[in-house]
Structure formats: C-alpha cells, structure tokens
Amino acid sequence: MFEIIKRDGLARIGRFETRSGVLETPALLPVVNPKIFTVTPRELYDEFGFRALITNSYIIKNNPALKERALNEGLHKMLDFEGVIMTDSGTFQSHMYGEVEVTNEEMVQFQKDIGTDIGTVLDIFTEPYWTKEETAASIEVTLERMQQACDMKGEMMINGVVQGSVYPDLREDCARRMAVMDIDVHPIGGVVPLMEQYRYSELVDVIIASKKGLNPNRPVHLFGAGHPMVLALATLLGCDLFDSASYAKFARDDRMMFIDGTYRLGDMQSLDCNCPACRGHTLETLKKLPKDDRTRLLARHNLYQITQELALIRRYIREGRLWELVEIRCRGHPALLDALRRLKTHTEFLERTEPISRDGALFYTGSESRARPPFHRYAERLMTRYVPSASKAAVFPDGGKPYSRAYADEFDKARRAGYVPVVVSPFGPVPAELDEIYPLAQSLFPENTDAETVSATDEMTFNFLEKMGFEEVIEYEEIPDNGEQGYDADLIRARAISNYQFGIEATDAMFRGEIEIVKSRKTGKIRNVISDGEHILSLRAGDGLYTLKPAGALRILEKVPAPFMRVAVNDDSVPFVSNGRNAFCQFVLEMDKEIRPMEEVIVVDKDDRFLATGRALLVENEVRSLKKGIAVKVRSGNGDEA
Ligand code: GUN
Ligand code: ZN
C-alpha cells in the first residue's frame, strides 16, 4: 500500500508498506552484487540508513553456492539485511550479454522461493535505437509475461516494468495496460542507455509518457538511475524509487560521484570532500591506499553523495520548492539544461498537479523558470477569467511590488480617468486589481531582465489588450490629470480575485445584492466579503486568495451545476465531514477533474447537499486510485477559520 504524505507537483513524499517494513520515498536502493559486497548490506542499513536494496536473482540462480544458500536460508538471512529486498530478473543480463536461457515463469518462481519482497518480471529491454514495430512487438511479450507474473506472485510484490524505447505513445500505452494489472511497483525500464548517453531531454519525455498511463497509487521506480545529478529532476517528474550500481562500479574504476558530475581520481587536483568517508583524507593519502581499501572508501563516498542529495530533495519537497532545486541542478550540465528546457513542452500536464499556491515566494532562476506551471496557469486564467474593470487601459512598466502601493497615486489617476492600470510583469500583464495574488506578489525576479522574458511578456500583453477589447490603450505617462470618475477599488479587487480563482459563473453566483467589504484596520487589506448580509469569502493575507465560506459555497451549489468545485463523499463519511473531519480518499464518490491541489472545494453528499468547505490535497485521479490518505482538508463545521 502506497500513501502520499506530502506532495509538490508530481513529486511526493510517500510511505510504501511492504512485509519487510515501511519504505519512505523518495528512496534509492543500492545495488548489491551477491558475489562481492563492496559495502555490506549490514553497513548499508546501519551506517547509511538504507531501508531497501536491490540485488539480482538471476546471478544468484546461476551460481550453485548462492542458489543453494538463498533457497535454504532465504535472501534476507543470506544478505544479512532486514529491510526491503527487491530483486531484478535477469532482463539486463540477457540484454547486455545475451546469456539468459531461463523463462519468465522460472524467474518469478525463483524470486518467490528465495523470499524476495519485490520481484521483477522478465521484461524485454527496449533499446532507444529500436524501430517502433520492434518495440511494439516486444511490449506485447512483456505484457504477456507480466500477466503470468501477476497470476503467480502470491505474497510477493511484483515490479511491472514499463517499456517502450523512446516512443511516448508506446510508453503511455504500455503503462496504461499495466495500470489495470495487479502490480505493486512500476519501474520505468530501458532508460539506462539514455542516461549513459546524457540524453536527458528524451528521458523527460519517456518519464512523462509513462506517468500519464500509470495510476498514482503505485510507486514509480526509475531503473538504473543512481547518479545524484538526475535525482531531483526525476523526482520532480514523479519518480519515487531509484537504484544505483554506479556507486560501486565507479569506485572500482577510481571515480568519484559529486553533485555536478563524476571525476576520475587521476584528474582531480585536490579532494575537497567533507563526507564521513573522505574526512581526514587528502587526495594523496587516498591514492596511496591499497586498491581494495580505496574502492571501499570511494563507494562509501559515492553513497554519501546520494544520501545527501536525497535528503535535500525531501527537504525541498516539504518546502514546496523542488522545482527550484531542479533548476539549480540542471544548470550543472548542458544535457540537463536541455532536459529542463524540455519541460516547457509538458507544462499542461504538469499544471494539473501544481498547487494553487505555495507558502514561500517563487524564485526566478532564469528564463527557463517561465516554463513552470504557475506561469502557464496565470496566463490561462487571465485570458479566460478576467473581466475588464474599465473600458480603457493604461500600461505601466514593472515598478516594485505590490504594484498598487508602488504606483498608488498613478493608479488612482488612471482609475479616475477611466483606465484600468495594467503592469507588464514577468508573468505577463497584471491588471492592478490582481497584483496581490499568488504568485504575482509572492515572487522574486532579478532586476536585470532577460530578452526572452521581455519579448514573451510583451507578446502576452499585446494579446491580452487585444482580447479584452479595450477601446483605448495608452502608456502610463499619457494618463490625463483631470479624471473625475468615481470607482470602488475594493469591490473591483474583490470581484477580480474571485473571477480569477473561481471563475466568472461562480463569482456571479456569490456576489449578489449589497456587497460589504471588511478590511484590516492594521494593513488596510481586504479581510472578508459580505454579500446580502452573509459572509461568503475571506481573503488570506499569505497568498492573496480566498477561503470559501459555507454561505458562498451554498450559492455556488445553487447556481453552478455539479461537478464544479465538488468533492462528493459517500454516506459513511457524511457525519464525520459535517463535523469538520477530513475527507479521506476511500470515501470519495466523485470529484471535479478541474480541482487542483490546495484549491478551495465544496464537500457534498451523494445528492449534492452541502457538508463542508475545505482545501483539496490531491487531484481527481489520485483520489480515485489511492486507498489511503486525505483527499480534502476540511474546515471545522462552522467554517470560521481560514
Ligand atoms: N535494469 C536497468 N534497466 C532495466 C530494465 O529495463 N528492466 C529490468 N528488468 N532491469 C533493468
Ligand atoms: Zn567524500
């Protein structure tokens, strides 16, 4: 059973329950060669804290002594490892050396017999240079073997390896067909050559195509990804498990892994590493060590690099900033920068799991940052949900945030003359009334802009001004002094944020009759919106977006047909949710597919009757497939606090 504890886009911190204990993801499984331990499984567990490893059942089966021991005492005792043991099936050996004469049935049975926790089907490795026909035909064989493995797996968990070479449609189709089988973990296979050849941009396409077809309720393993430099990127794309043989292979080769690449001992000028393995050593003392001692030390160094990066990745997920770590990492190598740029082509898919807002500010690290989902979402919502608050527009350059404070007098002058102030920001055009919503206000950009951002935002502004049909557009210096028009800046703002956040239809349903706006005496910011005497919305100071109140929710239920903004729960859940308890995945009947993480939602019963308001933690396909976890964080029954 896999439970998502914390998510950041497609990345997640999860708990994977196995019969040998719980595995916290993202996790890397060191590859242990059953013939030679460069670092013993006991050390991996005790010293490095690895709770899972992967070894090769084919190598064990082919070595009479190991086979005998594994069958007699079981894999855990043989390796002296009490954590989770995954085994591979010999696919890679067969593929690389053409030596496997075993059947899928034999391999699955053997893995069961030696007590592996997670076994692997004997899949067919699809090479990047294969033709589409060749690839498609081999996937059929893998799928047949997969069904056979599922039928015979018993108590053992099974890896369903997604293959498909570099063909996204074949990858997605293979994933989709495996998603309905009784599989426990999904490795993405056939990617080692892509990584060895630094084809990270294609790796991005392969991972995303596979993720599209898979269900979110199973961990995804990137087979053969063990270099710390790719871990952040792969995690961002929704990979939960990794394995590394290179920590030992590189060590035997006198190569050291660092976050920015791999270095040969012979090429290095100095050691400059403070990891527990290297501490107290210099390059010279290291080189003088006997070969075996040196290999052991380098392997341990490599493992420390991996564990350190994984810890950092987990921290960035918790802080909701993994995308920033990925941008930093991907600047370390041109091939990774290519991968980062490739993400732009997948923005729409990535937007579906992007939270509505985050706690911290969005940091811009370069023009690639514009490919992040919040940029895409802002542009999309502005173009489809913004209703002009005047018939003319005055265009301002970015001049310090929040714009309505930096340009207080100029904005007032523009309003009185009948113009909407529109600031050209790195997000695109920002009408004055939207300047405090996430991520517009909660973001940091360098003052020296780049040409790419300038031209993109100019184009967006042009399209926006044209689409909104303003009868006149002027530069801010041209605003006439003598405007006399009255305007209600608070009401304009209150409505515009609602349009942006909930859409025009829901806003029209909520804003009716007399509107009263309650502001904070201390900050002067909008706190509550009261309509016809009922408290419909509260504005959060942090992200400048609304918390939906029961009165607002009832008006939406009345006017906007289901499933809009709804999460419907079954009868068992009704008494709990009405009392302010969270809505759990297993009780959800239906959910609006347009709901994004952290979005305001209305929890209803099966007949669309109001139960509570809250914030969604997961999206529809996640809620549908996960058996455990909170779908909606519900507000207390009376809905008083944000
Ligand atoms: N190890 C690295 N890549 C693969 C793969 O595609 N399949 C299997 N079974 N093992 C692998
Ligand atoms: Zn070191």
Image (spheres, helix red, strand yellow):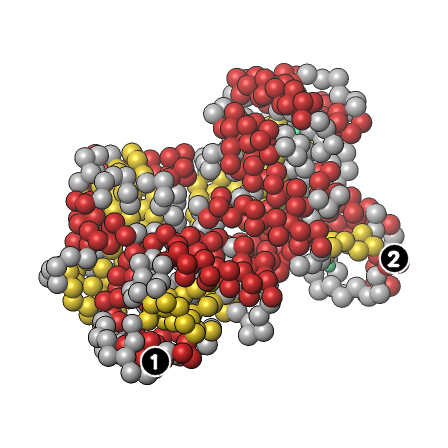
User: Quadrant for ligand 1?
Assistant: top right
Q: Residue pushed farthest front? A: 471
Residue 88 x/y as whole percent: 66, 30
Whether residue 73 is visible here, answered yes or no, is: no
Which label number is shown at residue 266?
Answer: 2
Residue at 32 percent across and 46 percent down: it is: 632
Residue at 66 percent across and 54 percent down: it is: 337
Callout 1: CB less than 8 Å from ligand 2: no
Q: Is residue 264 shown above or below 16?
A: below
Quarter of the rendering containing residue 260 = bottom right
* Amino acid tagged 2: Gly
Residue 624 x/y as whole percent: 37, 35
For residue 472, side relative to residue 119 (left or right):
left
Q: Secondary structure at mark 2?
A: helix
Nearest the viewer among 105 and 168 is: 168
Nearest the viewer among 394 and 28 is: 394
Q: Quadrant of the N terminus?
A: top left
Say which label, 1 or 2, has the lower sequence index.
Answer: 2
* Amino acid tagged 1: Pro
Q: Which residue is mark 1?
A: 480
Residue at 62 percent across and 60 percent down: it is: 328
**How much space separates mark 1 and mark 2, taking CA atoms?**
71 Å
Specify few, some or many for label 2: CA neighbours under 10 Å numbering under 14, 14-19, or 20 or more.
few
* Mark closer to the observer (1, 2): 1
